[in-house]
Image (cartoon, coloured by chain):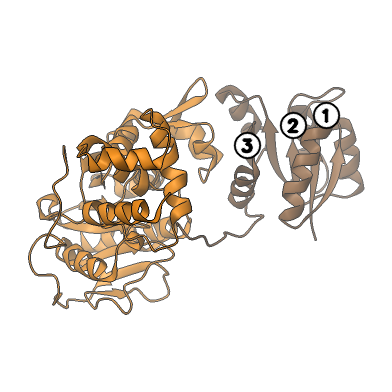
């Protein structure tokens, strides 16, 4: 890949998705975009870039998807799901006892492993939640991964990463080498396509937001802006869950760490000074079909 | 020292499993069938057993039944590792006292994930990019 091609891809990704690649991520681009080049019948990344420069919005959309799709697996990192079961839901059972409803947002729902892990956690709590209305909204930038999430179909490899065998037996149906999560659990998750750079106030207000391993892609200014808007999309006593490598500390005071629970945050009540307006960036290139 | 008994009639599978588990700090012993495995457990109860299903002499399912009736035989974490990947086999294995179940083909990530499930390996911190 030539340096000008790399710079071009960096800029396109920054403008379209907020993905902020450092100068040394050539390997990442190659590993994600070479397969895409071949899928498009092109010999290499140079030719892919030519197509993008030629104004092919569908190629640009596919490049953005290929670069921003994360590896994910069921109950990834375990700890956030322990927080969910042992801290978040017990707190919510008290705080929402009157209205008996909880709204949960998976802000980088990807291929569904995270929202379905939450759905299984809720089912495992059994009668505790009887009579409660629990909504799980899964959003992602990529329509392709959302389709996979909706289908709830996973390969044998995918169901062996992070999913205890008892839960596989309990909540999945086998179809040859593929495994599909039960309709009852699929019905617990609603899917929406969403770019976090854009206004998301239409989703309403949430009690719990899982926003893991997505903000790492953004530059500092964008992160601060998104935190500000996440805080406004959350009840004052809600919970924010971030990825293991992420934090609000040093970036914003709209959330504060929850004591002794790594990755868990609550709104501080402070208003975000830098989060005026709806969307994250002054200039966001329009994306075809999004 | 954590010990793992690797039970499989294929020398290739035993070799691959040994390499993966040694990297995870297990001390490995090997058995070619359920009968050899049972003898090994009577001598010294391992921390974990990685267990194939289909083997000559005594298969993995029968071995598991005998193991769980031995004194101290309820202690080892038993992880099946087999091409028998139908729901019926998985359910039978769990009823017979298996702790986890790996459907072949397997790799290092799957073995590590399953050994984490049964609490034999600590969670590793990982960075998403």
Task: Check disc 3 and report the residue beneath it.
Answer: B101
Residue A122 in sight from this viewpoint: no
Q: CA distance from mark 3 to mark 1?
A: 18 Å
Q: Residues within 10 Å of mark 1 (few under 14, many from 20)?
A: some
Say which mark, if any, is on residue B9: 1
Which of the numbered marks, if any, corresponds to residue B52?
A: 2
Q: Badge 3 sits on which subunit?
A: B
Tell which circle, 2 or 1, labels the residue nearer the N-terminal end: 1
Image coordinates for residue A263, horizontal then vertical, percent: 39, 67
**To which quarter of the image does residue A165 belong?**
top right
Residue A150 position, x and y percent, is 30, 33
| Circles 2 and 1: CB atoms closer than 8 Å | yes
Chain ID, orange in image: A
Q: In which chain is the residue bearing label 2?
A: B
Label 3 Cα crowd, 10 Å radius (few <14 / some 14-19 / many 20+) = many
In contact (CB < 8 Å): disc 2 and disc 3? no
Q: Are marks 2 and 3 on the same chain?
A: yes
Chain letter matching colour brown: B
Q: Are marks 2 and 1 on the same chain?
A: yes
Q: Give percent across and percent down for residue A271.
A: 13, 76
């Amino acid at each position: 890949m030539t340096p000008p091609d790399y710079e071009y891809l960096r800029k396109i990704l920054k403008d379209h998705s907020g993905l902020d690649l450092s100068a040394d991520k050539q390997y990442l681009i190659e590993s994600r975009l070479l397969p895409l080049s071949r899928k498009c019948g092109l010999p290499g990344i140079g030719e892919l870039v030519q197509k993008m420069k030629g104004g092919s919005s569908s190629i640009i959309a596919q490049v953005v998807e290929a670069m921003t799709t994360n590896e994910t697996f069921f109950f990834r990192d375990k700890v956030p799901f322990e927080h969910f079961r042992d801290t978040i839901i017990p707190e919510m059972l008290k705080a929402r006892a009157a209205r008996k409803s909880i709204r949960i947002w998976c802000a980088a729902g990807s291929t569904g492993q995270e929202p379905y892990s939450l759905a299984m956690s809720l089912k495992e709590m059994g009668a505790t939640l009887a009579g409660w209305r629990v909504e799980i909204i899964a959003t992602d930038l990529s329509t392709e991964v959302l389709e996979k999430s909706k289908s709830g179909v996973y390969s044998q490899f995918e169901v062996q990463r992070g999913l205890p065998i008892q839960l596989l037996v309990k909540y999945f149906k086998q179809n040859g080498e593929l495994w599909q999560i039960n309709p009852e659990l699929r019905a617990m998750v609603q899917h929406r396509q969403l770019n976090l750079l854009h206004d998301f106030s239409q989703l309403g207000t949430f009690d719990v937001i899982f926003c893991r391993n997505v903000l790492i892609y953004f530059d500092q200014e964008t992160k601060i802006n998104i935190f500000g808007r996440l805080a406004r999309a959350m009840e004052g006593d809600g919970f924010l869950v971030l990825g293991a490598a992420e934090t609000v500390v040093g970036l914003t005071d709209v959330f504060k760490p929850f004591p002794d629970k790594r990755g868990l945050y609550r709104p501080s009540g402070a208003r975000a000074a830098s989060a005026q307006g709806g969307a994250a960036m002054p200039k966001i290139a329009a994306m075809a079909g999004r | 020292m954590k010990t793992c008994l690797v039970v499989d009639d294929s020398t290739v599978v035993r070799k691959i499993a040994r390499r993966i588990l040694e990297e995870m700090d297990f001390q490995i012993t090997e058995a070619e069938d359920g009968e050899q495995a049972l003898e090994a457990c009577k001598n010294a109860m391992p921390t974990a057993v990685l267990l194939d299903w289909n083997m000559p002499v005594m298969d993995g399912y029968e071995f598991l039944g005998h193991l769980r009736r031995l004194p101290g035989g309820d202690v080892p974490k038993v992880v099946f590792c087999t091409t028998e990947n139908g729901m019926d086999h998985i359910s039978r294995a769990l009823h017979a006292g298996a702790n986890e179940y790996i459907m072949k083909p397997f790799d290092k990530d799957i073995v590590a994930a399953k050994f984490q499930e049964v609490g034999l390996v600590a969670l590793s911190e990982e960075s998403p990019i």
